[in-house]
Amino acid sequence: MNKILIANRGEISVRVIRACRDMGIATAAVYSECDRAALHVRLADEAWPIGPSAPRESYLRIDTIIDAARKAGADAVHPGYGFLAENADFAAACRDAGLTFIGPSPDAITLMGSKTAARQAAIKAGVPVVPGTDEPLSDQATDEEVRRVAERIGYPLMLKAVAGGGGKGMRMVASAADLPGALRAARSEAQSAFGDGAVYLERRIMSPRHIEVQLLGDHHGTVLPFVERECSIQRRHQKVVEESPSLAVSPELRRRITTAAASVAKAVGYTSAGTIEFLLDEDGSFYFLEMNTRLQVEHPITEMVTGVDLVQWQIRIARGERLDLDPEALLNPKAHAIECRIYAEDPDNGFLPSPGRIQGLRVPQGPGVRDDSGAYEGGEVPIFYDPMISKLITWGDTRTHAMQRMRRALAEYQVRGIRTTIPFFQWILEDEDFKAARFDTGFIDRKLGKGPLRPIDASHQDLAAIAVAVHLFTTPAANGVAAPAASRWRDAGRTEALR
Amino acid sequence: MIFEIAVGDKLRTVGIVRKGGMLHVDLDGRTHIVDACRISDSVVSMLVQRGDGAAPSRSIDAAFASSQQPARRSLGEGGGDFDVHLDGRTIPVQIRPAGSFGRQNKAGTGAPTTGPQRVVAPMPGKVVRVLVKPGDEVKARQGLVVVEAMKMENELRAARDGRVRDVAVTEGQSVDAGAVLLIVE
């Protein structure tokens, strides 16, 4: 394998470029119109334009991307996550074009991509699933038919998109009265997000924790599970903070849940990196939720606690190498790691997206800190894509140590000119329940809406007022962000002085 | 030189003069002596000491960005002209030459607390749902319209109680940043 085309953008594209470079493999990036100056384009060995900014016309265009790979002379394609990463047609198109797809087989993607088929696979492997419908509810099913199915499962329940992911097309239904509205909303969201309006019902586990198991499978029949990740801190069903290991998982439970995950993957002949997600109930029972047939956003925390480079292993597996990692070591974390997903969203304003130019950037550094980012000073966060700009990962000997490092790193992290979720994470890191690892997937929803996240105290307001005055007073008239304003202030100041 | 600076919900009067190598900053009647060192166009390192010398000088690294928050302004919640980044915090501030704040507010160009609210699209996107119709009574924070942008659905809410006067958009419609979606009075 000499050259890999990365069919993605942003931080994950940068992450894959780094893995390739660590292995001495050349990289080809692809970019849409608005991404010409994006970091992944600047860092890659070469870059190929693939069309207009809208994802549908560029990063989701299988034909254009295959064409770029051919022109680049790449012998493999890494899909990253999102976009075409879980698209079986794309994996098949790569194969048909003579390109190695760095991921699982098209069949595995198809099978696990259907939430209902994946449930069947888990059941066959002897792994418990959340009680619910085994078949999708057809688009034609009437409210009355759905209501009958719902009554059999019992309220409260979850409506989920068969093709789902990322919380899209998902609705909680508390009672029969909410069902018709939730059904319409879930179907329409699923239709627009996945082009498939099919949904199914699952009983709602009341206070579950989200526990997931990273796996690697090679082409020689070996499947190895890794120590679990906990991703219970979610907002609108999107993970925002992840950690590994989970304080809720004992060594004995770890043994059982990782064995269960591996048996599902083996049952479907899974290869490459994948993740099996579980709900962990308060009583310690766990249920298969779904399998993600790709590298995950939160993969770095597993890398930091096991010392394994998952992206490099994806590439090695794709080259046909044997997994020769020590299975025991993968289940014994050497550290505790936490990840915060930094989004270009304004937490003080309903998490509205905050795209725009990054006027200034200060990235945290020092021991125990990793910043996987697609951002740079002067760069634009475009409006067309997911607003995640970077992932901040910290680790330490203990969870307490990792949390303290995260607080330190968040305080060092400055992203100026746009709003980000950094203050939101500072608020989470100060929460007593978070500190004690007392949470479930409803944590954020329960805590949010109880007043402003992190009111600015009087002493910091004083310092801000002093800083602004000093800034305006000392800014040379012709430069800096405040330049036009500063001269006006200066004029006003003169007027004031003459009075 | 005198500035009026709004931080949080307070309007501060800040006077500043240079004495020797130091800046003397008078904040609401209390003097701070500041050793200011400009790091770049948008970053200043300050050693701040209270004028009475009672507290040790604090090292404050302050960085500035012009604010890009049309959504905030449109919702009538008051916008910052600057974001000040210091001590791990992001603090929005508004600056006016001394005396102009009162005039601006009287003229109604500041953050309005009365009068019609124009709810505008914070960015280009697609209207997915309109949750109210003309004539509806709405409460503060009530959802009005849902706009999809950056793959997420964003609910725009009423800044305060009122009645929906006009709804200028329909579901499915694409809108540009700044487009007026509806008016609440």
Image: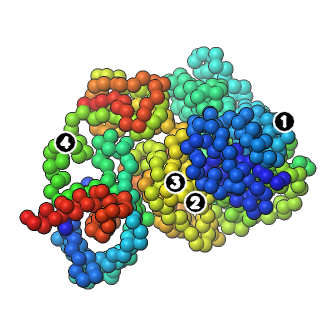
Q: Earlier in the sequence, mark 3 or mark 1?
A: 1
Where does the N terminus of chain B fall, quadrant-wise? bottom left
- The answer to whether marks 2 and 1 sit on the same chain is yes
What's the residue type where badge 3 is placed? Gly
Secondary structure of residue under mark 2: strand
Contact, mark 4 vs mark 3 (Cβ under 8 Å):
no
| Chain letter of disc 1 in the image | A
Residue nearest the observer in this picture, A50 or A23: A50
Residue A371 location, x and y as percent?
Answer: 59, 61
Q: Is residue A268 above or below residue A456?
A: above
Q: Residues within 10 Å of mark 3 (few under 14, many from 20)?
A: some
Residue with the mark numbered 2: A392
Residue A220 visible in the snapshot? yes
Residue with the mark numbered 3: A379
Residue nearest the observer in this picture, A65 or A476: A476
Residue with the mark numbered 4: B108
Contact, mark 3 vs mark 1 (Cβ under 8 Å):
no
